[in-house]
Image (spheres, rainbow, N blue to C red):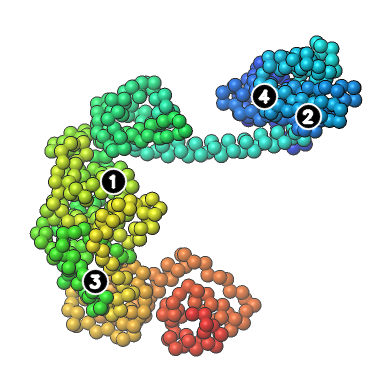
Amino acid sequence: MSNTIVFIAPNSHIALLAQSAVALLKLDIPVIEAYDYKAIEELRKYPSCRIVISRGGTSNFLKGVKGLTVVDLTASYFDIQKSVNELVKKGCNNIAVISQDNVIGLTSAEFAIKDVNVSLHPCTNTEEIINTVNTCVRNGADGIVGCAVAVETAKEHDIRVAPVETDFFTIKKGILNALELEANLEDHDRMIERIESVLDNIEEGIIIFDAENTPIVYNDCATRLMRPEPLNKWYQKLFVHLKNTTDSTNLVTLNQNRILIRVINLKKSNESEKVVILTDSSAIEETAKTIKISAYEKGLVARRTFKDIKYASQIMSETVALAKRFSDSDSTVMLFGETGVGKEGFAQSIHNSSPRANKPFVSVNCASLPQGLVASELFGYAEGAFTGARRNGKKGLFELAQGGTIFLDEITEIPLEVQSQFLRVIQEREVMRVGDDHIIPLDIRIICASNKQILPLCEEGKFRFDLYYRLNVLSLAIPALRERGDDVIVLFANFFCEFLHQKVEDLHLEENIKNLLKDYSWPGNVRELRNVAEALSFYGNSFTLQDLKKLIQRDFIHKETSNTQIPLLREDLTLNELEKQYYTYMLKKHSLKEICLLAGISRTSLWRKLKSLNLEDSY
């Protein structure tokens, strides 16, 4: 059986008490009577031991063993007082208490008990204990209380002695402390295992050098990239590159491979450690081939214009008018709006209405870019940057948009470490490819979009304040579909007729269908409305109110039941009590319009029902 805790008793008295405590606690902890070198010899029989419980000099001796944690057994005030009283009864008047400082404490002291003078002398080693006993005897001590070394030395002077014993409760407390420490060490081991697992499963080499430039942490990828260099030569191999590398990425040749290297300096107390991040450029190229960026899928053309934005509401009229004014400017535009409101449609329309309309429009979904590829995809890379790279290098997305517009959707997903480089591109309108020293001037218009509030992210440290203020020059908030009134009818008609290839003028919608379309909250906005119109187009022009209800309720109820827990209805309730419990729950979760939709009743009927149940004040 694995013994991670071992009790080393320096004398038979402590050994007997320890055996009793272990038996009382029903533990399987070996108790060994040994001290100093003999204690180490005994511990070799327990290779899995990580924690030792011991006392005095033996405890200090064991602290020199690497990988071993020692729990000290200290002497309590009552232990010392008991030994002092024993000497007082024998007629001693000047008593010195001498032992290891991990037994009687670190502080020297003198005090009197009636007519008896007592002095405490904590020592750090055996030699100091012997010298202290001799000094105290010369200075008039007639009694010595202390450890085994102190007692044996005092006997040579033929004066009275009393050993400092450790009681049962102190030993029991020491065992319990060791058990708590064992649990903490196990938690620490599990955390280390998790960290090692993460490090070994990422595609970048991670090396941490201590203040003496020794690798103290490294993962499998780092070992592979540094091969065949031995571990003690790693820093020497990297030194030339490290002195020329800061937080910015540097492209270097390492063991015939093209490697992107980055250095992060860590400050720990007065020591300085370095984290070196190595990325195989060939892995970046391979991963880049698998990424589907919207600019590549859709081409570099903006297909939508302001004429394609269908609306009838005043709020959308004002929004479109402001967007058209933005088209005449070359300033950066920031689009805000929920998912599905049509932010890319506005971006394309602004581009097509601007002087850059005949130039490229590059659309990038920042959330689709893996962290390690953001820089190379946005800024490009130079010729020969890595094995298998294109002969003339590769243009980044900013270069592809040269003369035109780049649209960066979900801008908040750009990694924090790339945001500083991105900020420089926006400020200076110039870019430098990865692995190159040539600056390329840019003539582009930047439009960004986000479905999140950015300032809270800045306050949380997830987005740079300076980047936010640089991007948020011209701000356009696109309203949600539920805020656009009759626009939902206009949009539905256009989508429905588009799928049926018929004219909008030929479509007639019943009033109850229109009311339902307007009453629904459309959490997915225009995108959700388009999906519903496509599904109803399979019914043709003969679709009914019930067909629409089924589609809306299916999505709505699925959303609600997957995120909420409906309270159970007890069988002993009356019908009136059941209804009251049902409507009380619905009022907490839904608007009145949504309750009418789910319950299949009119607004007037709902009001009467709530009044009869005394719930009219609950909404």
- Marks 4 and 2: CB-CB under 8 Å? no
Is residue 123 visible in the rendered image? The answer is: yes
Tell me what residue is drawn at x 19 percent, y 59 percent: 331
- Cα separation, mark 1 vs mark 3, equals 32 Å
Which circle's residue, 3 or 4, is located before the other in the chain? Answer: 4
Q: Secondary structure at mark 1?
A: helix
Q: Nearer the viewer, mark 4 or mark 2?
A: 2
- The 10 Å Cα crowd at callout 4, few under 14, some 14 to 19, many 20 or more, is many
Q: Nearer the viewer, mark 1 or mark 2?
A: 2
Q: Nearer the viewer, residue 272 or 364?
A: 272
Q: Secondary structure at mark 2?
A: strand
Tell me what residue is drawn at x 25 percent, y 49 percent: 423
- Cα separation, mark 4 vs mark 2, equals 28 Å
What is the three-letter code of the residue carrying label 4?
Answer: Ser
Task: Write down the residue under mark 1.
Answer: 420
What is the three-letter code of the residue carrying label 3?
Answer: Thr
Please say if 200 is above or below 336. Answer: above
- Marks 1 and 2: CB-CB under 8 Å? no
- The 10 Å Cα crowd at callout 2, few under 14, some 14 to 19, many 20 or more, is few
Which circle's residue, 4 or 2, is located before the other in the chain? Answer: 4
Residue 59's mark? 4
Q: Nearer the viewer, residue 105 or 519?
A: 105
Where is residue 579? Give x, y as percent. 55, 81
Q: Secondary structure at mark 4?
A: helix
What is the three-letter code of the residue carrying label 2?
Answer: Phe
- Marks 4 and 1: CB-CB under 8 Å? no
- Marks 2 and 3: CB-CB under 8 Å? no
Residue 111's mark? 2
Tell me what residue is drawn at x 78 percent, y 22 percent: 96
- Cα separation, mark 2 vs mark 3, equals 86 Å
Where is residue 437? Give x, y as percent. 18, 36
